[in-house]
Image (cartoon, helix red, strand yellow):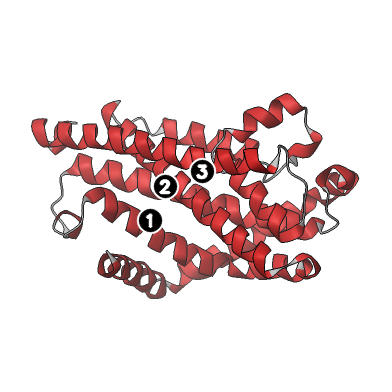
Amino acid sequence: MFKVFRMALWMNVTLLRRYNSNFIFWMIYAAANAILMLLFIPLYSASISAIGTKSIISFILIGAAMLPLLEETVSSVAGEASFELWSGIINYSFTTPVSRYIYFSLNSASEVMVSLMIYSPIYLIAIFFAFNYLTPLGVLLSFICFVIGFLGMLQLGFVIGAAMLLFRRVEGLEGIITLVITFLSGAFIPLQVLPSSINYAALFVPLTSSLYLVRYYLVGSSLIAPLYLMWAITIGELIVFALIAKFIFTIAEKKAEKIGFNYI
């Protein structure tokens, strides 16, 4: 598994280095995304008592960097799983000593590593403004929350990828789910200032609980639910999505092998 991950990481880094303009434009996109997010400072500042931290810039930038990063996880694995199973192309992903499920996971993880490099300036700026709030334990717990959030979004990507095949390549499904995640994750609008009914609904949207836990441990912001409930939902979403992903991905894979990849 380590060799497969290293191969995928090497491939993605090589492609990034080969097309330097892509790397430059991705960096520009990341910077523009963060700058545009800072336009929300007046909204956040007016709600500073509800948000629970004075490090508003860090609060915003964490959302600006984490949202596209984890959205990419969903898009990457959903698109690749759907295309590989549909096209029937026999390539390296079909001849590795690991399953396609593991291969897609490792490849998506390698793309996240590349994205972390692209978004690293934003994280560094966020950490700089949150320096007074940082503790070794807080950094460790925020990293754990980030990893759990990534794995949960990864499973969601598998669900979407398999569903795109079983329901005849409905790419619009990915767009709808991404839209819901974007506006109910709390990355743009602080959920603390919204009605509690919306907060509890947003908790069951992938990314929301992990994002708020990361903010909580890095900048000391308030949570939208008790800490134990946030952890329970974060871990619960990972388990539930993993079970659903494994089930629906297996169905799509068996159906593709039975009737022919190009006919699914």
Quadrant assignment, res 88: top left
Q: Nearer the viewer, mark 3 or mark 1?
A: 3
Residue 234: image location, x then y, percent: 55, 42
Residue 232: image location, x then y, percent: 57, 40
Residue 196: image location, x then y, percent: 75, 28
Q: Nearer the viewer, mark 2 or mark 3?
A: 3
Check if mark 1's residue and mark 2's residue have beta carbons within 8 Å: yes
Of residues 80 and 100, the one nearer the viewer is: 100
Residue 128 visible? The answer is: yes
The residue lying at 15 percent from left, 49 percent from top is: 89
Mark earlier in primary sequence (2, 3): 2
Residue 122 visible? The answer is: no
- How many angstroms separate mark 2 from mark 3 (CA)? 13 Å
Q: Kindly identify which numbered label has been placed on residue 108.
A: 1
Check if mark 3's residue and mark 1's residue have beta carbons within 8 Å: no
Mark earlier in primary sequence (1, 2): 1
- How many angstroms separate mark 3 from mark 1 (CA)? 20 Å
Identify the element where label 1 is drawn. Answer: helix
- Report the amino acid beneath label 1: Ser
The residue lying at 31 percent from left, 65 percent from top is: 5
The residue lying at 67 percent from left, 62 percent from top is: 138
Q: Kindly identify which numbered label has been placed on residue 235.
A: 3
Of residues 137 and 40, the one nearer the viewer is: 137
- Report the amino acid beneath label 2: Leu
Identify the element where label 3 is drawn. Answer: helix
Of residues 108 and 209, the one nearer the viewer is: 209
Name the residue beneath numbered marker 2: 154
- How many angstroms separate mark 1 from mark 2 (CA)? 8 Å
Residue 86 position (above or below residue 80) = above
